[in-house]
Image (tube, rainbow, N blue to C red):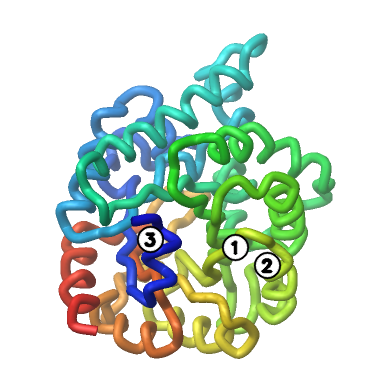
Amino acid sequence: MSILDALTGKRVLVLDGAMGTYLPEKVVGKKLWSAHALVNDPEEISKVHEGYFEAGANIVTTATYQASVKGFLEAGVVSKDNQEEEAARLFTRAVDLAKLETLGESDRFVAASIGPYGAYLAGGQEYTGDYGSIRDTQLCEFHRVRLETLQKSDADILAVETIPSLQELKVLIGMLNKNPAKPYWVALSVNDVKYMADGTPLSEAIKIIETGGNVVAVGVNCTSVETAGQTLEELAKHTRLPLIVYPNSGEIYNGETKQWESSASTKTLASEASGWHDLGARIVGGCCRTTPDDIKALREKVDQL
């Protein structure tokens, strides 16, 4: 079964939860986050993937959200002379680690994460879209090697996620249209139930996303459980694409203090799953600070739908 077969069959697929939450001493506060473990502790990443699959997830995402040629170079992970080749090997390693956990299982899939430029900046810009005066060509060059490598990898789908700005959205859709090798979903970063993080109306973002030839789902991630349903309701007004939703725990990460602030949501992934399904969500999961326990409860709820 391919992931497209699963979506076409009107099933609800369960996505994994947080990666970095499981590696706090190793990655929290480091600029590479889970990509740091990709370099130094790949076996720890394998354990996280295994844990989510055992909890009932159908899809796990690779540890490439915060991985980039530029980030690896600045961290001293790759050499200046061979930075693209060495970074590409790390991107491929991330996919291979996840794919190993799918062997012999027909209902397990791997999504290769394409995180935003804001994740590289590591100051919370993926939640504001405040990239300054960056040019389209700079964004294109930032994403190029990772996108090309993951397009050629064994991943089942690309996860274009936490995209906060219309500018970056246009750049990525343009790049994906030039090389439509794999299906992909787009999950937006929002600052309100009707707007992207940079203030762009979701209706305008949908118009750009639907120009993508291989896009199979659109939605939102790393927002609170409380507001996720309202955002899905707004998205459903403007598209007939399957929806995807994977909120965070409700806690907020302060990019300056490197600490999680506020308390977790009173609502849970499982308690909201039925409503999300009614709105058209066909891929549901968790983001920052969610756990295999959350995914296990979500799996049990999805099986009742």
Q: Amino acid at mark 1?
A: Val
* Residue carrying label 2: 209
- Secondary structure at numbered mark 3: loop
The residue depicted at 45 percent of the width and 61 percent of the height is 4
How many labels were placed on the picture?
3
Indicate which disc, 1 or 3, sits on the residue closer to the N terminus. 1
Q: Give the foreground label among 2 and 1.
A: 1
* Residue carrying label 3: 287
Q: Are marks 2 and 1 in contact (CB under 8 Å)?
A: yes
The residue depicted at 74 percent of the width and 44 percent of the height is 139
Residue 83: give x, y in percent of width and height. Answer: 62, 18
- What whole-number distance in Å separates the C-alpha atoms at marks 1 and 3? 21 Å
* Residue carrying label 1: 215
Which of these two is toward me, 36 or 172?
Answer: 172
Indicate which disc, 2 or 3, sits on the residue closer to the N terminus. 2
- What whole-number distance in Å separates the C-alpha atoms at marks 2 and 3? 21 Å
Indicate which disc, 2 or 1, sits on the residue closer to the N terminus. 2
Q: Residues within 10 Å of mark 2 (few under 14, many from 20)?
A: many
Q: Amino acid at mark 3?
A: Cys
Furthest-top residue in this view = 81
Q: Give the foreground label among 2 and 3.
A: 2
Which of these two is toward me, 143 or 165?
Answer: 143
The residue depicted at 59 percent of the width and 63 percent of the height is 215
